[in-house]
Image (cartoon, rainbow, N blue to C red):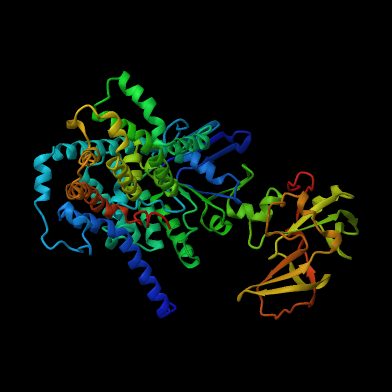
C-alpha cells in the first residue's frame, strides 16, 4: 500500500474532527443547557461547563409533568409503527424483488412517489378518515398515519436489499423441502438481517421524532400525548424553562441510542458473504 | 434412484420459445449431461425438472411419477447450484442437514447422516464453521454434501464447477463422477464446457436454441455427429469445415481443395454436381508427403501437442453467417486447424502437404445442416 502524505493524513483527521464537532456540539449544548438555570443561558462569557450542575432538573421534570406517560405513549407508537411497517414492507419488497409482476416496475415507482408527498398533504384526508372511524385521540391514529409514510420508503430499502440476494438461496431451500413462506422466514429474513435492522431503525427514528401527526390527532387530553408534544408544551408564553426542555430532550434521546446499540450488530454488513463462490 | 422422462416439454416467455419439443429418457443411475452454448435452454430445462420453473406444456416424470405440477420440495431431488447457494447464516452442519430437517427427520438421525456425508467429502473439521470461513473448493463440497445427504431420487447440478480454478475443476470433476458411480443416483448435470460433458457423462444431450440437437455417448457425438452444429461444438478444437462441389474422379467421388483433389467417401457418388459442406477433425488431418499443399499461418505449441493453423482456400470457405455455426463466436471460416502430436518442429509460413483420410471426412447438406448418409 502506498504511504499517505503527512499533509493528507492531517487533512483527513482535521475533516473527521470537524465533522464530529459539528455533529456532537448540539448534544453537548443540550446537556450544558439542561444542567444550569435558564438565567445563565445568556451569560457572557458563556460557561462551557456549569460551575454548579443542577442535576435535580430531571427529578423536577418527572414530578411536575406526566413525562413517563408521554414516554410510554411514544414507545408504544414507535414500536407499533416499526412492527407494522416492517411486516407490510417485507412482503411488499419481497414480491417486488422476486416476482415478475405485470406492471411491477410501475407499481414500485408509484409506491416510491407516495413517499414524496409531504406529510401535511395527508393530514386533512387522514383526519377525516380517523374522525369517521372514531380513531381521533387514539394512539392508533398516529401509528397508522406514520405507517402510511414509512412503509413506502421501507419497501424500497428492503427491495434494494433483497435484490442483492442471490435467488438461488431460496431455490435451494425450496428444493430442500421448505415452503415458500418458510423460505422467507428461515432463509431470506436471517440473511437480510442487516437490511432489516437498517429499515427498523429508520422506521423507529422517524416515528419517534414525529410531532405533526401527534399534534393533529392526539390533542384531546395530555394523557395521550407523545414526548415531542409534551416537550413542546413546556415552552411557555412568557417564560420558558430551557433547562427543563433540554432535560426532556436528553431523556427522549435515550431510547433511540438504545435501539441503535441493539441493532448495530446487525447493521454490520457482510452477513451474506460465503453463500456464493 | 429413478428414471427421468421429459415428454414434449415446452417453455415460452410470452412470444419467445425458450424450449420446444424437448423429449428425453434418462435411465436409472445414468449420468446425463446437458451441454450447449449460453442461452441454449439447458439451465431452463434443469430448472423445469427441479420445479423451479413452470413448464408451458408437456410432462416431466421422475421414477415413473408425473411431477410436472409438484413443487420442488415434493419431487425428491437435490440440486447443486453454480454459486453453491449455501445458507450464509448457518454452519456447515446445519447447511447439510437443512433438507433432512425440512423433511421431518429426528435430530439424532440428521446428525448421523450429516457426519457420514462430511466424512465422505472430508468436511468433518469444518462442520461447525460458517460458509464464509471456507475456501471455494470446500464450499463446493458442502453444496455436494447437502445434495448427497438427502439420498434423493436424482441429483441436479447446474454448472457446479464453473467457479473453481482450472486445477481444482479437473480434480472435482473426477470426484463427482466417482461419487455418482458409488451412490448410483441418476444425475442430470448442466455445463457449457464440452470437455466436462465428454469426460463425465454416460449420456450427453447437446442443445442449441432451445432444441435438442443430438443425444448420445461421447463416442457417438464425436465420431458420428448428426449435424454441423454438433460436429463443430464437440471436440477441442472443433471440427474443420470446408465447402466444395462433388465431382466424379477416376477412382470415385472427389472434391477440390484449393488446386488439389481430395477423395470423398463412396456415399458421395450419388451427390455428383452438388455443393456440400465437408468436415474433418483437426486430429484427423495428417501431414503427408503428397496431397493438397498449404502454408502454416500460426503454430501453437501446447507441449505434447501442437495446433497448426492454415488459411482455408478462398473457394472452399464457408459462408458462416448462413450456416448452423452462425452463433459460434470462436469459429473462423478463414482458418483450418491441424492437431499433431509429434517431435517435428513446425514454423510459421512453412509449406506442408496434407492428407485427408477418406473415412474421417463428414459430409453435410448445406441446406439442412444435417449429416448425409
Say which of A256 and B314 sits in front.
A256
Say which of B127 and A275 sits in front.
A275
Residue B178 falls left or right of residue A205: right
Instruction: Write the residue at 32% across / 51% down.
Output: B96
- Quadrant in which residue B115 is drawn: bottom left
Instruction: Write the residue at 86% across / 58% down.
Output: B255
Q: Residue furthest top?
A: A132
Instruction: Write the residue at 36% across / 71% down.
Output: A14
Can you see residue A41? yes
Instruction: Write the residue at 32% across / 63% down.
Output: A20
- Quadrant for the N terminus of chain B, please: top left
Say which of B317 and A266 sits in front.
A266
Residue A69 falls left or right of residue B287: left
- Quadrant in which residue A230 is drawn: top left
Q: Position of residue B214 (x, y in %)?
A: 63, 46
Can you see residue B51? no
**Image: B158 above or below A103:** below
Q: Position of residue B197 (x, y in %)?
A: 55, 55
Q: Position of residue B302 (x, y in %)?
A: 62, 74
**Image: A53 above or below A109:** below
Amino acid at each position: 500500500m502506498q504511504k499517505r502524505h503527512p499533509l493528507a493524513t492531517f487533512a483527513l483527521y482535521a475533516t473527521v474532527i470537524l465533522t464530529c464537532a459539528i455533529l456532537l456540539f448540539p448534544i453537548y449544548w443540550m446537556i450544558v443547557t439542561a444542567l444550569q438555570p435558564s438565567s445563565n443561558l445568556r451569560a457572557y462569557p458563556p460557561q462551557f461547563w456549569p460551575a454548579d450542575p443542577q442535576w435535580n432538573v430531571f427529578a423536577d421534570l418527572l414530578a411536575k409533568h406526566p413525562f413517563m406517560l408521554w414516554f410510554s405513549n411514544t414507545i408504544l407508537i414507535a414500536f407499533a409503527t416499526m412492527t407494522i411497517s416492517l411486516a407490510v414492507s417485507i412482503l411488499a419488497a419481497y414480491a417486488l424483488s422476486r416476482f415478475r409482476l405485470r406492471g411491477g416496475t410501475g407499481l414500485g415507482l408509484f409506491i416510491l412517489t407516495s413517499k414524496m408527498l409531504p406529510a401535511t398533504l395527508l393530514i386533512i384526508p387522514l383526519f377525516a378518515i380517523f374522525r369517521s372511524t372514531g380513531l381521533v385521540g387514539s394512539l392508533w391514529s398516529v401509528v397508522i398515519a406514520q405507517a402510511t409514510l414509512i412503509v413506502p420508503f421501507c419497501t424500497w430499502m428492503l427491495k434494494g436489499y433483497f435484490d442483492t440476494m442471490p435467488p438461488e438461496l431460496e431455490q435451494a431451500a425450496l428444493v430442500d423441502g421448505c415452503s415458500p413462506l418458510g423460505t422467507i422466514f428461515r432463509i431470506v429474513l436471517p440473511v437480510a438481517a442487516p437490511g432489516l435492522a437498517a429499515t427498523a431503525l429508520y422506521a423507529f427514528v422517524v416515528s419517534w421524532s414525529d410531532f405533526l401527526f401527534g399534534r393533529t390527532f392526539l390533542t384531546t387530553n395530555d394523557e395521550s400525548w407523545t414526548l415531542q408534544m409534551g416537550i413542546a408544551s413546556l415552552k411557555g408564553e412568557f417564560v420558558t424553562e430551557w433547562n427543563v426542555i433540554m432535560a426532556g430532550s436528553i431523556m427522549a434521546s435515550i431510547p433511540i441510542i438504545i435501539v441503535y446499540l441493539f441493532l448495530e450488530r446487525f447493521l454490520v454488513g457482510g452477513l451474506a458473504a460465503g453463500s456464493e463462490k | 434412484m429413478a428414471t427421468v422422462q421429459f415428454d414434449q416439454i415446452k417453455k415460452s416467455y410470452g412470444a419467445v420459445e425458450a424450449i420446444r419439443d424437448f423429449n428425453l429418457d434418462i435411465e436409472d443411475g445414468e449420468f446425463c449431461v446437458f451441454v450447449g452454448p449460453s442461452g441454449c435452454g439447458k439451465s431452463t430445462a434443469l430448472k423445469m425438472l427441479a420445479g423451479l420453473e413452470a413448464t408451458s406444456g408437456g410432462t416431466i416424470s421422475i421414477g415413473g411419477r408425473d411431477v410436472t405440477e409438484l413443487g420442488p420440495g415434493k419431487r425428491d431431488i437435490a440440486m447443486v447450484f453454480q454459486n453453491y447457494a449455501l445458507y450464509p447464516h448457518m454452519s456447515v452442519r446445519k447447511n447439510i442437514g437443512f433438507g433432512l430437517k425440512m423433511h421431518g427427520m429426528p435430530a439424532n438421525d440428521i446428525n448421523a447422516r450429516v457426519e457420514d456425508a462430511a466424512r465422505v467429502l472430508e468436511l468433518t473439521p469444518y462442520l461447525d464453521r460458517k460458509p464464509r470461513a471456507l475456501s471455494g473448493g470446500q464450499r463446493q463440497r458442502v453444496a455436494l454434501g447437502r445434495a448427497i445427504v438427502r439420498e434423493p431420487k436424482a441429483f441436479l447440478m447446474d454448472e457446479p464447477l464453473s467457479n473453481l480454478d482450472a486445477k481444482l475443476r479437473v480434480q472435482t470433476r473426477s470426484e463427482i463422477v466417482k461419487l455418482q458411480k458409488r451412490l448410483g443416483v441418476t444425475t442430470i448435470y448442466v455445463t457449457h464446457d464440452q470437455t466436462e460433458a465428454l469426460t463425465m457423462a454416460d449420456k450427453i444431450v447437446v442443445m442449441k436454441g432451445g432444441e435438442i440437437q443430438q443425444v448420445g455417448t461421447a463416442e457417438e457425438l464425436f465420431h458420428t455427429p448428426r449435424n454441423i452444429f454438433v460436429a463443430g461444438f464437440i471436440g477441442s478444437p472443433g471440427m474443420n469445415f470446408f465447402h466444395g462441389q462433388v465431382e466424379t474422379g477416376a477412382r470415385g467421388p472427389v472434391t477440390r481443395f484449393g488446386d488439389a483433389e481430395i477423395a470423398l467417401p463412396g456415399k458421395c457418388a450419388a451427390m455428383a454436381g452438388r455443393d456440400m459442406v465437408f468436415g474433418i477433425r483437426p486430429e484427423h488431418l495428417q501431414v503427408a508427403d503428397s496431397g493438397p499443399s498449404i502454408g502454416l499461418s500460426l503454430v501453437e505449441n501446447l507441449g505434447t501437442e501442437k495446433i497448426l493453423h492454415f488459411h482455408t482456400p478462398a473457394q472452399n470457405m464457408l459462408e458462416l453467417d448462413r450456416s448452423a455455426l452462425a452463433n459460434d463466436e470462436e469459429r473462423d471460416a478463414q482458418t483450418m486447424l491441424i492437431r499433431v502430436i509429434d517431435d517435428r518442429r513446425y514454423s510459421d509460413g512453412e509449406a506442408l502437404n496434407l492428407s485427408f483420410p477418406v473415412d474421417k471426412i463428414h459430409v453435410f447438406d448445406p441446406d439442412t445442416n444435417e449429416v448425409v448418409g
